[in-house]
Amino acid sequence: MAKQTKASENPASTRYGGWDFARDFSTQFFALLNTGRIFPALLVLLALLMLLFGVRMPTEELAPLSNHLLDALSGWTGVFFLLLVVTNCGWMLVFHERDKLHQQEIKRLTDIRSQLMHGGDMTLIKEHRSSDGEQQEGYLLPSQQHSSREGGSP
């Protein structure tokens, strides 16, 4: 009889502990920073700091601190904080729109390059003049068929 094997021989490998969470959290947090999403990363960091202070602080000191915070935010400080949040959200929208425009331009140029590289009858350019002198190239350009149809030289 064949011995039945379990999907996981080691039960420790199926546990998800604190170090696994820390590894996954840091990976996702740094992925936010690497992709330019600094504001969500800062919000996560701020939430973690508030959670840390809330957990570590004695309960009898937590209520006066929250009252003091609400009193501070109800005056001009709160107005300026709200203005800060609104302007940062506006900048996030501007950066998002700019990134979308850049991606559209990259796609447009990629489509043009693909058409030049893979579309129709092509000729290979071996040398090309640039500001540095003669450069070895490997670009393919479409042939000039339309000029021969218009009466130009083939």
Image (cartoon, rainbow, N blue to C red):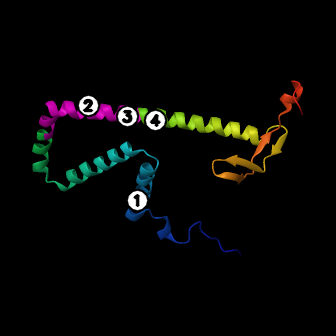
Give the position of the C terminus as an image quadrant: top right
Q: If you read the primary sequence from the N terminus, does the residue marked by circle 3 or circle 1 appear first?
A: 1
Residue at numbered disc 2: 83
Picture coordinates of residue 75 (x, y %)?
Answer: 13, 30
Outermost residue, top side? 150
Question: Could you tell me the amino acid type at mark 1?
Answer: Phe
Residue at numbered disc 1: 21
**Mark pair 2, 1: CA separation:** 35 Å
Picture coordinates of residue 6 (x, y %)?
Answer: 59, 68
Residue at numbered disc 4: 96
Asked whether residue 74 is in view, the answer is no
Is 152 left or right of 105, judged from the image as shown? right
Is 121 left or right of 97, judged from the image as shown? right
Question: Could you tell me the amino acid type at mark 3?
Answer: Trp
Question: Could you tell me the amino acid type at mark 4?
Answer: His
Q: In this view, does 56 lie above or below 111?
A: below
Q: Residues within 10 Å of mark 4 (few under 14, many from 20)?
A: few
Q: If you read the primary sequence from the N terminus, does the residue marked by circle 2 or circle 1 appear first?
A: 1
Q: Residues within 10 Å of mark 1 (few under 14, many from 20)?
A: few
Residue at image coords 13%, 36%: 72
Q: If you read the primary sequence from the N terminus, does the residue marked by circle 3 or circle 4 appear first?
A: 3
**Mark pair 3, 1: CA separation:** 32 Å
Q: Give the range drawn in magenta.
A: 69-93
